[in-house]
Image (cartoon, rainbow, N blue to C red):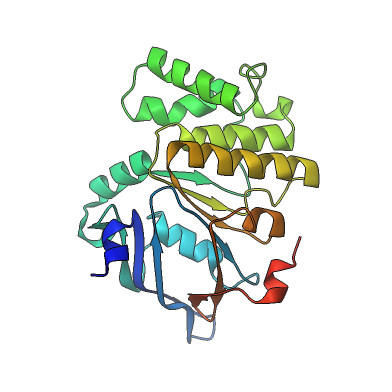
Amino acid sequence: MSDRASTSVLEAIDLRKHYRGGDGGTIAVLTGLNLFVEPGEFVAIVGASGSGKSTLLHLLGALDVPTGGEVRLEGESYAGLSSDHLTERRNRKIGFVFQFHHLLRDFTALENVMIPLVAGGQSETESAARASSLLTQVGLSERVTHRPAQLSGGEQQRVAVARALAMRPRVVLADEPSGNLDPPNAEMLHELLGGLTRERGQALVVATHNRSLALRADRVLALHHGKLEAPRGDEMMSS
């Protein structure tokens, strides 16, 4: 194992993912991909639509199983874990931010952020205090009792960021987190997401088409033909 691999918080090694096509043939989405992410590092993944960016994040987050290769979190392979142990590590060690916020509409902003904390065994009092603190940090101290329908799209995504950070994860995975936001709200979310994870030394891996967000990263990688490589000039010109 290389020195870099030994210090990485998240590793993908010879990662492969194939699907069965409608004609019975095999569609190879990832074809031996390698990725090493350091603690506190912000990595942006760019590439054409359909190149496999979401598939990669799902594999990194233990939401799907690879066809071959492996993913390791803090040196421990997902392949060696039972379903219960894998779920526990995913819930405690990985935060997710998606293009669609997936907030529960009948719950307030505070309650939505509390959900992973209560599920993780914290008391309601502790969970409420932690959730309130996070919502203050994302600029929503005056909106804690509002339900998703009472919040703007940008505010809903900020609640989703607070929820992703609730369990103090080692890694945050974000899939087109600003894809549904107008430019001002997108910029606010970019600054917030990058700033909060850096303050905490959390690794951040973002799949994005947004040039502004990618340029905030410590490293930008492009997904081409199932592998990661240096981005081409035109891939950094998208907005």
Q: Position of residue 177 (x, y in %)?
A: 62, 49
Say if residue 139 shows up in the picture: yes
Q: Which residue is drawn at 62% across and 30% down?
A: 105
Q: Position of residue 61 (x, y in %)?
A: 41, 54
Viewer-closest of 108 and 130: 130
Q: Which residue is drawn at 54% across and 50% down?
A: 174
Locate residue 150 relative to residue 170 in the image: left or right.
Answer: right
For the image, the number of numbered tags is 0
Viewer-closest of 185 and 37: 37
Q: Is 24 above or below relative to 71? A: below
Say if residue 210 shows up in the picture: no
Locate residue 165 relative to residue 140 in the image: left or right.
Answer: left
Instruction: Please identify the quadrant where the N terminus is shown.
Output: bottom left
Q: Which residue is drawn at 40% across and 35% down?
A: 168
Q: Is 51 above or below relative to 198? A: below
Q: Is 49 above or below relative to 63? A: below
Viewer-closest of 108 and 166: 166
Corner quadrant of residue 220: bottom right
Q: Which residue lies furthest to the top in this view?
A: 125
Q: Where is residue 25 in the image (x, y as percent from the top left)?
A: 48, 87
Q: Residue at x 38, y 44 (%)?
A: 170
Corner quadrant of residue 159: top right
